[in-house]
Image (cartoon, rainbow, N blue to C red):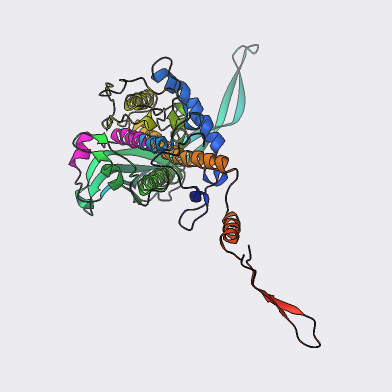
Amino acid sequence: IKSSRLHSPHRPNLLLLLPAYHYPKMSLSSSFELLSFQRKVKDALQTVERTLELERKPQLAADVDHTYGAKYGLVNLTSNAAIIAYVNCFEKLGLDAAVLKSIDKTKPATLRFDSSTACKFLQEVKVDVPMERSYEEKEETTGSDASKKTTKTRVMKAVNHVKEFHWEVEVNWSISVYSGTSVEEKKVIKSRTYETTLITQSKEGLGSTNLPPMELSLSWLLQQIDMVELTSQFKVDTEDGDTKTPRRNNAVQKALDFAAQLRQWCQGIEGSFFGHLQQHLLRKHNPIYRNPHTFTIGHLLGVNEQYSIFNPILPLMEESGPSDGDDVGNGVESKSIIELQYSNDSNDEHKTLLNSKDISKLLNEHVRTLEGAFSGIEESWPSESSGGILSSSEAVLSLLGNHLRELSAQYTETMSYIESMMENQLIAAIGKRLTPNDLDKFVKFHNARLLCPMPQPFSHDIRRPGHYPGNVSLYHLS
């Protein structure tokens, strides 16, 4: 097997290729798009090479010869990178080190997004709107001298009288964290409350709405963080009997469950809160004279495409590996509030992995690109005190929501990539993909060799006078 050593303590069981009841069959077409994932990682390699030292050439793990145990190390590295990247984003939403340390770890912790709108009718205003049509009247007058005539022209323009209805709208949203069921004692970490005026063409009420809260459990994430050292400590327990492969184990499954919940939370904010602003407020704002520079929901949802934020969750290895002594004490000042836990592991199985110093550099690049995007938003979007419905605060919320979804999707694809890489290596070693029919043939073949005489199929003739002969037999339907 190209990238596995049979003497590895974590060598795979070939029977894992057979479909089992608890583990669904792995398929590249059903799990993720391999080519698309490879293209994303190779695009990111240009940034990785600029971030690391000269002459460093990290590659996709499948392109580097490595041991089976190195796959577990790769899962641990990418999982810890994902945890720190999540925290980098949550910090920008107000979940900083002080808040993390203040959370009661003996109870489940929850991140909560609340939002509401309230509308009140102000006044009805009549606006004169000039129309394109106009009328001219000419009047000629003659003076005392008959030869002197003057002409006066009077132009009359049509004006349309339009009624506008002005509404006072108050929008409030907040992000908070609480422990257990103590919602009333929640700690608000980021919020915005503002009032603005909306103008409609009808007196139909805009109404007041309290949107359902969006909640995300932080219990798993906090369990992966050493709150004393503020380090990420995710690790797959290879001694656990439920650990089947680097991907199929309890630790990674819980990480994938959190990633799915995180995506759902971000999608809920976009669909519920931003969708409500668009459908019930911005869409109904229809003044006669519009401001051409007003930002729309389209601008808000597209803010993520304006900035290139580095994604540090990458399944990379290196042929030569980092030189000896490169990882002593890490030596890189982290820009994240959570650092990668330093490991003094000199196991030869992990020599192809990037060390903690390299991962810290990639995470610092993630923080740098995040801060660059925030600076751009602050310059181009109205401040949160401007009084408009959409400001830099909503743009940052949209940017982080989109990026958190990208991070969680990249982590899920990375785990699928590592599993598919191992699956492809095993299929290449065996020569084909094994199925239950192959196992059935294997058992029949070896039973025939072990049992003497060879068992005969259950088949007996049935004969009755005056009837055609028949038989009764048992056989397996494949």
Prevailing SS of the magenta stretch: helix
Q: How many marks?
A: 0
- Displayed quadrant of residue 9: top left
Q: Note whether 465 is above or below 377 in the view shown.
A: below
Is residue 294 highlighted in magenta?
A: no
Question: Is residue 102 shown left or right of residue 206?
Answer: left
Q: Position of residue 201 (x, y in %)?
A: 47, 43
Q: Position of residue 140 (x, y in %)?
A: 62, 21
Which quadrant is the C terminus positioned in? bottom right
Is residue 92 highlighted in magenta?
A: yes
The residue positioned 32% from the left and 24% from the top of the image is 357
Whether residue 374 is visible here, answered yes or no, is yes
Q: Note whether 183 is above or below 169 in the view shown.
A: below
In the displayed orientation, state which residue is furthest to the front.
452
Question: Is residue 430 shown left or right of residue 111?
Answer: right
**Between residues 298 and 370, which one lies in front from this camera angle?**
370
Q: Position of residue 473 (x, y in %)?
A: 67, 74
**Between residues 147 and 430, which one lies in front from this camera angle?**
430
In the displayed orientation, state which residue is furthest to the bottom.
465
Q: Note whether 26 is above or below 153 in the view shown.
A: below
Q: Position of residue 170 (x, y in %)?
A: 32, 43
**Between residues 75 and 398, which one lies in front from this camera angle?**
75
Identify the magenta region: 79-103
Whether residue 397 is visible here, answered yes or no, is no
